Image (spheres, helix red, strand yellow):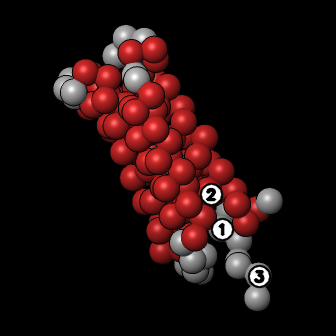
Amino acid sequence: MSLYLKAIATLVISILAAFVAGIGNGELGDLDTGGWVKVALVVLGGTGFTWFAENVTGVLGGAIKAFLGAATAGLTAWTVAYENDLVVSQGERLTIVIAVITALTAVYQLRNTRTPA
């Protein structure tokens, strides 16, 4: 389980970012099926990149996965904000920044385990 902890955190934070961006702009029902497919691709792709990233020792080891998690959360929030009405408002930009900072700090704080040989 600890091998997947950073990827799971990325997944959870990105899903939360999608819901917050959707609710902040009105209703989640405003997003059509194509929009949700795009959101799902961003979330799953970013989570996959986070999981596949190599666990290396030192500060960079945690930072690589943290940056991938932050990018995934930010892109997820941006995708929902844009797909809702094809405009990203100032409040939505703030939501995107908060999602990036939250994912960056949360994923970085999780323990980085070594990949089994």
Q: Which residue is drawn at 56% across and 60% down?
A: 48
Residue at disc 2, secondary structure:
helix
| Mark 1: amino acid | Asn
Looking at the image, residue 71 lies above or below residue 95: below
Q: Which residue is drawn at 25% across and 21% down?
A: 85
| Residue 13 image label | none
Residue wearing tag 2: 6
Which corner quadrant holds the N terminus?
bottom right
Q: Which residue is drawn at 37% across and 11% down?
A: 26
User: How many numbered marks does the figure carry?
Assistant: 3
| Mark 3: amino acid | Pro
Label 3, residues with CA under 10 Å away: few <14, some 14-19, many ≥20: few
**What is the distance, in whole Å, between disc 1 and disc 2 at their CAs?**
8 Å
Between disc 1 and disc 2, whose residue precedes?
2
| Residue 38 on image: x %, y % | 41, 41
- The part of the image, by quadrant, that contains residue 86 is top left
Looking at the image, residue 53 lies above or below residue 8: below
Q: Residue at x 69, y 56 (%)?
A: 5
Looking at the image, residue 17 lies above or below residue 5: above
| Residue 36 on image: x %, y % | 45, 32
Residue at disc 3, secondary structure:
loop
| Residue 2 on image: x %, y % | 76, 62
Label 1, residues with CA under 10 Å away: few <14, some 14-19, many ≥20: many
> Could one spot residue 104 in this view of the protein?
no
| Residue 112 image label | 1
Q: Marks 1 and 3: which is nearer the front?
A: 3
| Residue 116 image label | 3
Label 2, residues with CA under 10 Å away: few <14, some 14-19, many ≥20: many
| Residue 47 on image: x %, y % | 55, 55
Cβ–Cβ under 8 Å for marks 1 and 2:
yes
Between disc 2 and disc 3, whose residue precedes?
2
